[in-house]
Image: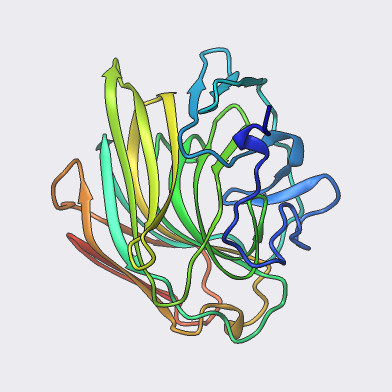
């Protein structure tokens, strides 16, 4: 019998890709779009047809496309190392009960300096601050999903019970067109099944995470998040990420709240109007 898809490495990434290789996190930790987390709490699912179920007791049940199953118990994430430029830099929020979100943006230029930093850029939904978040994410630099000094794309589900689920990481290029979509179905009392899909429409590739049992989502977000940035040249050289064609609940968003969490003097600014949000850095 062959390996479970969970154990098969993504095939289209540069050779230096390796999970958990970020110098930002200490021993036993790896970098996620919610900071440094215990490696035991992070589960990389290299199977676009796997189905994840969030159980009421906090367990995470995974059924792979080959019929194999795994159950991951709840995991308390703990605190990883802290950095002066650590976490969300800026974000636009649409505070509304959300069952659909999508947007399109372009992969920016790579940073001109490499100080071991990681850049995350994404659209996504949350069910409240510091709780569950689902997100198709482009990254430059390493994370728990793999990666290195190049752009890559994966779909993430961060649970309030301390587990981190991520789809296979796929290689992308500066200038590629990205589509990030999150779509709910089968909602009962606010709990839904979601398909979290990141697509590189230039290359015709995608990476998907399907999850059942996610609590009601109350915020749609567009976000720049960084770790280990020490100077302005550690940000992408293009200096902006422009999200277009944004849709929330299959309609143009009506009200964005703009928040800058960290101002490094690197041109941080947000403009937001209905279907277009621009993040400057």
**236 left or right of 39 in image:** left
Front-most of 177 and 248? 177
Is 205 located above or below residue 48 in the figure?
A: below
- Return the x and y of residue 100 as percentages of the image width and height: 26, 40
Front-most of 42 and 278? 42
Is 115 located above or below residue 84 in the figure?
A: below
For the image shown, how many numbered marks are present on the structure? Answer: 0
**213 left or right of 166 in image:** left
- Return the x and y of residue 50 as percentages of the image width and height: 50, 31
* Residue 96 seen anywhere in this rendered image of the structure: no
- Residue shown at the point (74%, 60%) measured from the top left: 22
Which residue reaches farthest front? 1
Front-most of 14 and 122? 14
Which residue reaches farthest right? 27
* Residue 122 seen anywhere in this rendered image of the structure: yes
Q: Quadrant of residue 99?
A: top left
**195 left or right of 142 in image:** left
**82 left or right of 184 in image:** right
- In the rendered image, the quadrant that contains the N terminus is top right
Is 161 located above or below residue 137 in the figure?
A: above
- Return the x and y of residue 136 as percentages of the image width and height: 43, 50
- Residue shown at the point (29%, 62%) measured from the top left: 104
- Return the x and y of residue 116 as percentages of the image width and height: 72, 71
- Residue shown at the point (67%, 20%) measured from the top left: 73
Is 3 located above or below residue 279 in the figure?
A: above
- Residue shown at the point (60%, 18%) measured from the top left: 59
Q: Quadrant of residue 149?
A: bottom right
């Amino acid at each position: 019998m062959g390996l479970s898809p969970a154990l098969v490495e993504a095939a289209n990434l540069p050779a230096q890709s390796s999970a958990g290789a970020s110098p930002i996190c200490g021993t036993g930790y790896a970098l996620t779009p919610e900071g440094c987390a215990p490696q035991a709490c992070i589960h990389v699912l290299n199977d676009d047809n796997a189905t994840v179920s969030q159980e009421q007791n906090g367990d995470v049940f995974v059924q792979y496309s080959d019929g194999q199953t795994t159950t991951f118990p709840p995991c308390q994430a703990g605190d990883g190392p802290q950095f002066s430029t650590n976490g969300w830099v800026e974000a636009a929020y649409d505070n509304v009960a959300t069952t659909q979100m999508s947007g399109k943006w372009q992969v920016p230029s790579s940073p001109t300096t490499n100080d071991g930093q990681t850049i995350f850029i994404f659209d996504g939904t949350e069910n409240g601050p510091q709780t569950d978040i689902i997100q198709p994410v482009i990254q430059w630099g390493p994370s728990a999903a793999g990666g290195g000094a190049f752009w890559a794309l994966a779909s993430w589900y961060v649970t309030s019970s301390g587990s981190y689920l991520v789809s296979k990481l796929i290689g992308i290029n500066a200038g590629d067109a990205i589509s990030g979509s999150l779509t709910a179905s089968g909602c009962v009392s606010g709990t839904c099944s979601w398909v979290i899909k990141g697509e590189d429409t230039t290359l015709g590739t995608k990476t998907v995470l399907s999850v059942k049992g996610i609590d009601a989502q109350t915020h749609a977000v567009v976000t720049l998040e960084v770790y280990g940035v020490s100077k302005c040249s550690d940000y992408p050289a293009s200096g902006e990420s422009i999200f277009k064609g944004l849709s929330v609940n299959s309609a143009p968003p009506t009200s964005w709240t703009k928040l800058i969490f960290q101002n490094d003097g690197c041109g941080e600014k947000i403009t937001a109007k209905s279907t277009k949000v621009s993040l400057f850095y």
